[in-house]
Amino acid sequence: MSSGDPAFDAGSPGPQRYRELNNNQRKLAVEMLLSRSTDGRLEWGAISSVAQKMSVTRATISRLWKKASSARSLGVVNSPEINSRKKMRGRKPMYSSPEFRKELKKLPLQKRRLLRKISVNLKISLGTVSRFLHNGTMQAHTSALKPTLSEENKVSRIYYALEMRDPNNIRKFKDMMEYIHVDEKWFYLSKDKERYYLAYGEDIPYRHVKHKSHITKVQFLCAIARPRFDVQKNSWFDGKIGIWPVGDWVPAARSSVNRPRGTMVWKNKNINREVYRVMLIEKLIPAILEKWPTGERDTTIVIQQDGAKSHIKNDDVAFMQALQANGLKAKMTTQPANSPDCNLCDLGFFRAIQAANDEAMATEADLIAAVEKTYRDYPKEEINFTWLTLQSCLNAILECHGGNDYSIPHMNKRGIAQNSNLPLVLDVTPHAMFLTEEENYTSDENYILDSSNDISFESTH
């Protein structure tokens, strides 16, 4: 039988004499003695042999045997008498867990950024602070900056959430099957800081760049819809309308150490209204015509964009003419200002694509290929989860009176989906319903404010 301690399992005496045995080691010692006894009488030398194996004195084992023999004579097999009666010794801790929480809350947040700062300000050791962290007395939290919202922003967010309710049942949200969310994002060849897990002794990777502002990057325009089964095609529509790099392949104007003159190289374009309009007409509209479920062609598609200044107006003449020329029933709408949590791409899809992109890359061509591959391989189930997350955020927006002072709600969607109980839409929470009714908000199709109120939180990524 193993004691669970390598020092005891080794079977050879060590120079160290242990001051005490834990309860498992005490039971092991008694079992070793019992195996060398007959009718309660020990073999000659049994106590000394066990003491040597357990690296304790003979007197310690002798006391254990007397206690065990006394208990067995009374018919008690596993007696608590052989357990250690020694309690925790040493100096009394300065803080118990409740006391530490109380003192930690008194510290300003600026003094809680590092464990070492907490240690200095509370006058306790760094090891004690680390133990409080690992036993759950305190927890680490990453705080992200959020857009500042004006009162007009909050009102427009409330009306946006209300418009997402099912008109036939205002206690539930729409299924959002007719929506396409469009946005753009810069993807980088490498990040300033990367985390790797290395084998012990493995060489630390050497990463270098001429300047951190010169990290290779490519901007992409992305369009995403909600996945569902296309009955007429008898296949799944995965919701992925398309992702397109913003720029062109052009011949190199001069030679360099990396390539000869005339080699095709990638040149990024800055998104402005004209470039954006051309990409919508030449990329987005053909992709919708190709991929949209056949049985839903008569449904009016709602293309949602954010209010960045480089984006077109909702009634842009050239875009509307392109829709009519292609026979596509669609309209453009703008989400509330300063509200990345109202766009599926910003809410989590872009981060998921960036995190899942683990290809080895060296050039813009590698980056473009890697992003497109990651986009193609991204599971439709995860996209559907993000649409449900959007609905849970709408509930939070209503509960916060249009604010963004909330953490993205979690509902264990993956676990629910494994039991085939994942809902198509979420209920509007009673608290959200109560607050909207109390404030007497009503649906209003003109809730969207002027996109000039939008700030760089949405216009750059």
Image (tube, rainbow, N blue to C red):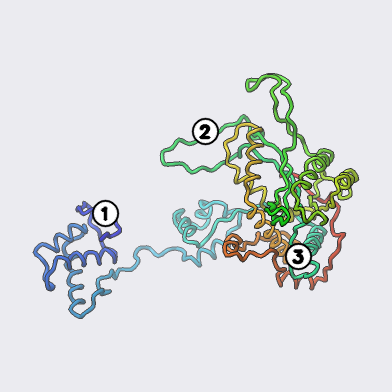
Mark 1 vs mark 2, CA separation in Å: 41 Å
Q: Amino acid at mark 2?
A: Tyr
Of residues 16 and 420, the one drawn nearer to the viewer in this rendering: 420
User: How busy is the neighbourhood of tag 1: few (under 14 within 10 Å), some, or many (20 plus)?
Assistant: some
Disc 2 packing (10 Å; few <14; some 14–19; many ≥20):
few
Q: Is residue 59 above or below residue 192?
A: below
> Residue 113: image x %, image y %?
57, 52
Quadrant of the image containing the C terminus: top right
Q: Secondary structure at mark 1?
A: helix
Which mark sits nearer the N-terminus, 3 or 1?
Answer: 1
At x 86%, y 61%, the residue is 445
In the displayed orientation, state which residue is furthest to the bottom. 74
Q: Earlier in the sequence, mark 2 or mark 3?
A: 2
Q: Is residue 395 left or right of residue 102?
A: right
The residue wearing badge 1 is: 7
Relative to 185, is 428 above or below?
Answer: below
Query: Which labelled disc corresponds to residue 401?
Result: 3
Report, in whole angstroms, how far the alpha carbon at label 2 lies from the one at label 3.
Answer: 49 Å
Q: Under tag 3, what secondary structure? A: loop
Q: Is residue 176 left or right of residue 39?
A: right
> What amino acid is at disc 1?
Ala
Q: Nearer the viewer, residue 67 or 285?
A: 285
Residue 234: x and y in percent read 69, 54
Please report the residue visible at 74 percent of the width from the left and 65 percent of the height from the top. 173
Residue kind at label 3, given as amino acid type: His
Say above or below: 183 vs 62: above
In this view of the protein, can residue 219 be seen by the observer? yes
Residue 206: assigned label: 2
Instruction: Specify the farthest residue to the left.
Output: 44
Q: Residue 146 appears at what percent x and percent y?
A: 70, 53
